[in-house]
Image (cartoon, helix red, strand yellow):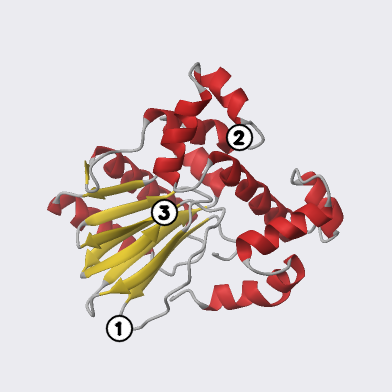
Amino acid sequence: MPDSRQRAFVWKYAESIGGKRPRHFHQEPELNLVVRGSASFWVGNRIVSVSAGELLAFPAGQEHALLDASPDLYLYAIGLDAAFSREVLGVRGDTVVPLHVRLAPAELEAVSDRAAGTVDRFQASELVAELWERSHWLGRQGAPCHGYPPHVLTRRALKLLETEPELGLGELAKELRTHASEISRYFHRDIGIPLVRYRTRLRLLAFIQLFDAGEHDLTRAASRAGFGSYSQCHRTFQSELGCAPRTFFSVIRQQMQLAYVR
């Protein structure tokens, strides 16, 4: 995860440097822009092959990992704090959805140059926000590489869950005026996990955010994040992240931070 003090970040990955991370998900929506080489990613429940000129988008909570790469792979990862992303994209009413698209050469060059100018820079949130907005817009216009774009029900469900993460499937169906089974089917296809599990991940991310904001009473943080009890939170945390909350905050978090190539 990026430094919690930053609202936006751009970091670079080169296969020659290394630094792969295991399968993970996080609160910050993220874009990966491949400028050189090729690679395969685990995204949701499928393996995706990418090459130079392609853009991947991961909404908050979607699992992803870099599996393997060509020796010349070079990419930029661009991310914004979830609230900042809503602020930046709010003018258009957009939200980050799963994407895998190819950019035109001129578009790739433009966003690559901008990414190169902001990579590893602190206190550059506004510059990264401009890059985020432009890259996201190009992603929405680009040609899908995997055969289909995310379904409109997935897009609308993600938009609602951004601000109301406790909405259940029945409530979403009522809001979207459709059958719950339709939302469930397309959401699972596009995100890679059932909607109920995705909502659980959002609660976990809220729990982590509360801790980062200074709420170190884990029982109170679990309750505020929407869990019925700390024991429920603990079981879910262990199941989704592979460790207990205290281990994550004291050990694993630091290891994850060090895995970023800066």
Q: Is residue 237 visible?
A: yes
Residue matched to label 1 = 16
Quadrant of the image occupied by residue 110 = bottom left
Q: Residue at x 51, y 39 (%)?
A: 86
Q: Position of residue 25 (x, y in %)?
A: 52, 58
Residue matched to label 2 = 163
First in sequence: mark 1 or mark 2? 1
Decide if residue 3 is on the left or right side of residue 21. right
First in sequence: mark 2 or mark 3? 3
Q: Which mark is residue 45?
A: 3
Q: Residue at x 23, y 76 (%)?
A: 70
Marks 2 and 1: in contact by CB < 8 Å?
Answer: no
Gap in Å between the C-alphas at discs 3 and 1? 27 Å
In the displayed structure, would residue 245 be above or below residue 250?
above
In the displayed structure, would residue 141 be above or below residue 101?
above
Q: Position of residue 108 (x, y in %)?
A: 20, 55
Q: Position of residue 101 (x, y in %)?
A: 25, 48
Camera-side residue of 145 and 242: 242
Gap in Å between the C-alphas at discs 1 and 2? 40 Å
Marks 1 and 3: in contact by CB < 8 Å?
Answer: no
